[in-house]
Amino acid sequence: AQSVTQLGSHVSVSEGALVLLRCNYSSSVPPYLFWYVQYPNQGLQLLLKYTTGATLVKGINGFEAEFKKSETSFHLTKPSAHMSDAAEYFCAVSEPYNTDKLIFGTGTRLQVFP
Amino acid sequence: DAGITQSPRYKITETGRQVTLMCHQTWSHSYMFWYRQDLGHGLRLIYYSAAADITDKGEVPDGYVVSRSKTENFPLTLESATRSQTSVYFCASAPANGELFFGEGSRLTVL
């Protein structure tokens, strides 16, 4: 069975500071990994995904994530936070070629202070 | 307009009443999903559908019924609503092995 653990339900950073949102996964097969963002009163939008190939994945809005198999991690980073990054972020995992069954983490709410 | 739409966006009902949440997508995606979002649980899959007339249970299907007579519609029915079904419900659609696209959510309160 697959699972995802997001460490920290709330993360606060100052504008311009590094953003680091943590995600660890458990999977018996090589996983596909995703980060979604949810702005207030909206649905989820895909930020980035890892399927195969390069382990450093770049997404929208300056976010990137690195797949580290040895650490079973897929942490999301952004070098410099912007006020507009304030949102809830969800990590998700699926089996390869089976992205219709995503398992979501519990989410991390990012606050950005001026 | 193209996209995925949910209705109603907000609904208040009473325990024991039947409620139907509607979901409509214009992309002709084969897959459609219903998730519920609760604090501390993230998103949990209720039901999904791989094509018209094909549906399957997700992680938390009890108390819910779905149908998919047409590719573009995937209604979710709570036959007898309970307070534990107070939640935000998200519909999503996706092509096979493709990205999920989410609706804006339906906030349901059961009194």
Image (cartoon, coloured by chain):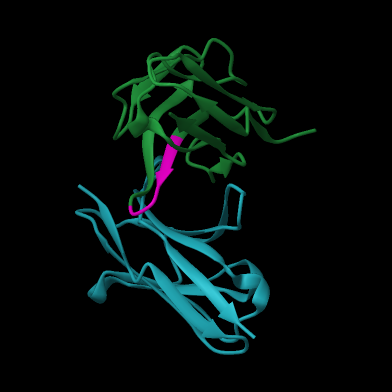
Chain colours: A cyan, B green
- State the residue at coordinates (40%, 13%): B79
Q: Would residue B31 appear left or right of B63 to someone viewing this image?
A: right
Q: Where residue B60 sits in the image (x, y, percent)?
A: 30, 32
**Vertical arrangement, residue A15 with respect to residue B74, above or below:** below
Left/right of residue B20 with respect to residue B40 in the rendered view:
right
Quarter residue B3 falls in: top right
- Counting every numbered tag in the picture gives 0
Picture coordinates of residue A34, whole percent (x, y): 45, 58
- Which one is in front, A46 or A5? A5
Specify whether residue A65 is painted magenta.
Answer: no
Q: Quadrant of residue A70?
A: bottom left
Query: Which residue occupies 51% across, 62% down?
Result: A88
Q: Is residue B78 visible?
A: yes
Residue in the image at 50% along x and 33% along y: B108
Taking depth in this image into account, of A112 and A23 the one nearest to the observer is A112
Residue A82, position in %: x, y?
65, 79
Residue ID at (34%, 71%): A8
Q: Main secondary structure of the magenta part?
A: strand
* x, y percent for residue A76: 46, 73
Q: Is residue A2 above or below residue B107?
A: below
Residue A76 to residue A50: above or below: below
Quadrant of the snapshot with the C terminus of chain A = bottom right
Q: Which residue extends farthest right?
A: B1
Q: Is residue A99 above or below residue A61?
A: above
Residue range (magenta)? B35-40
